[in-house]
Image (tube, grey):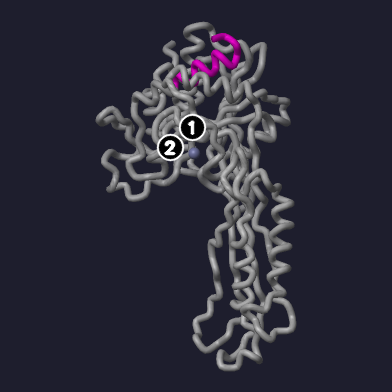
Amino acid sequence: MTLPTDPAANLATLIRCASVTPAEGGALSALETMLKPLGFLVERPVFSEDGTPDIENLYARRSGNGPHLMFAGHTDVVPVGDEAAWTHPPFAAEIANGEMYGRGAVDMKGGIACFIAAVARHVEANGGPKGSVSLLITGDEEGPAINGTVKLLEWAASRGEKWDASIVGEPTNPDVLGDMIKIGRRGSMSGAVTVNGRQGHAAYPQLADNPVRGLMSLVDALLHPVFDKGTKDFQPTNLEITSIDVGNPATNVIPAKAVAVFNIRFNDTWTAETLQAEIHNRLDQAAGRKKYRPGKKTPVDYDLVWRDRPSHVFLTRDDRLVETLAGSIKSAVGKEPTLSTSGGTSDARFIKDYCPVVEFGLVGKTMHMVDERVAIADLETLTRIYQRFVEDWFGQG
Ligand SMILES: [Zn+2]
C-alpha cells in the first residue's frame, strides 16, 4: 500500500472536496483514507445544537508508548466568492507556475496535507513516532464554530484523551515560510452600550434628553486614554467602536435611544474580568460629565451588555515545544522564526485549556481570497519542518 507521503497529492485530494462550511464535502472521508494505512484509529463524531447546522468532525489517534502530540486544524473552507474571478477553478487543484490553486490551499487544507505527509514519511523511514499522535480536525472553524473544536476537545477528553502538546496548522507566516510561530493570542470581547434618553423636538432640547450627547461622553471614555502601551509579549490593547446606531430618520426629532457597539482586543495586562471592571468604571465616571449635556441634573442613563463569552488572552510558556519547533524551522529554512502573539483569535484559544499549544503553518497571504494558492515548494518545506519537529519532539531526531 502506498502511504500518503506526498503533500501536494494529499492537498489536491482535499481541495477537490468542496467542503465550504458546514459541508463535509468528502474531506473527512479523504483524511480517513489517508490516515488508516498509517495506523490511526479514526472516529468522526457529529455534533448538533439548536439553530446551527450539524457538523461532522474527525479525531484520529495513532497510539504509542510515550508522550502525546496533537495536531489541530479544520477542513472546512470559506466560500469561493466570485468564481468567475478565479484564474483556476477553486475546487480543481490545478497547478500553474509551481503553485497549486484552490480554496483551502493555505487555510488550511495545505497544513493538514503536510502534517499527514510528515507522519507518513516518519512511519516509512523509521516506523513512526514512539509516542501517540492525534489529529483533531473540525468542519466548523470558518462558520459558527459551535459544533467544532470546543465540543471535539470535550468529547475526546471525556473519553480519557490527554495531550502533552499541540500544534495548530493555521497559516501563520506573513510573507515567507518560517517567518512566524504564534505562541499566544490577545483576548477579545465585545459589548454594546445603550443610552436611554427622552425623545423630543429638536428646537426644544430642554424638554428632551438627547441620548447622542450622552453617548458621545461614553464613547470618548472608551477611546481615551489608551488602556496600556503593550507588554513584552503583546501588542497594546485596542478598542474599536464597530457601530453607532440611532436609527432616526427625522432631522427635527431628538431620538430616544442611541447604541454603540465595540470590540476590544486585550493583552496580558488584563484579564477579561479586570478589563470589564475598568470599562464599567470609565463609563460610570463619564456618565456624570456635563461637557455635552450642560444643565442636565442626572447622569447619562445607560446599560452595558457584554456580547457572547470573552476569548481569554493566553501565552504558551512551554519552552520545549516552542524551541523544538523553532529549531525544526531553522534547520529547514535557515532562519529564526519570530515568536508572535499578533492577529485575531484561533482555535488555539480552546486547546490551551488542555495542553500547551503553538501555531505554525503555511504563508497566509492569499487566505480567504480569490485565487487562494500555495507554492508546491512550500508544501515540501513545511512537510520537512513538521517531520523534523515530530522526530525531535519525540526525541527520535
Ligand atoms: Zn483557518
Span shown in magenta: 383-397
- Residue neighbourhood size for the residue with mark 1, other residues' Cα within 10 Å, grouped as few (<14), some (14–19), many (≥20): many
Element on which disc 2 rests: loop
- Looking at the picture, how far across and down is residue 171, in whole percent? 46, 35
Within the image, what quadrant is residue 333 found in? Answer: top left
Residue visible at 49% across and 44% down in the picture: 21
In 3D space, how far apart are the residues under numbered discs 2 and 1 (Cα atoms)? 7 Å
Q: Is residue 387 magenta?
A: yes
Q: Is residue 291 depicted above or below 226 in this figure? A: below
Q: Which residue is mark 1?
A: 180
Residue visible at 35% across and 35% down in the picture: 373
- Looking at the picture, how far across and down is residue 173, in whole percent? 45, 34
Q: Earlier in the sequence, mark 2 or mark 1?
A: 2
Element on which disc 1 rests: strand
Amino acid type indicated by mark 2: Pro
Q: Nearer the viewer, residue 40 or 8?
A: 8
Left-right relation of 60 to 24: right
Q: Is residue 98 visible?
A: yes
Residue visible at 73% across and 52% down in the picture: 274
Left-right relation of 67 to 115: right
Give residue 57's mark.
none
Q: Is residue 158 magenta?
A: no
Give the quadrant of the C terminus: top right
Q: Is residue 189 depicted above or below 139 in this figure? A: below
Q: Nearer the viewer, residue 291 or 347?
A: 291
- Looking at the picture, how far across and down is residue 25, in whole percent? 45, 37
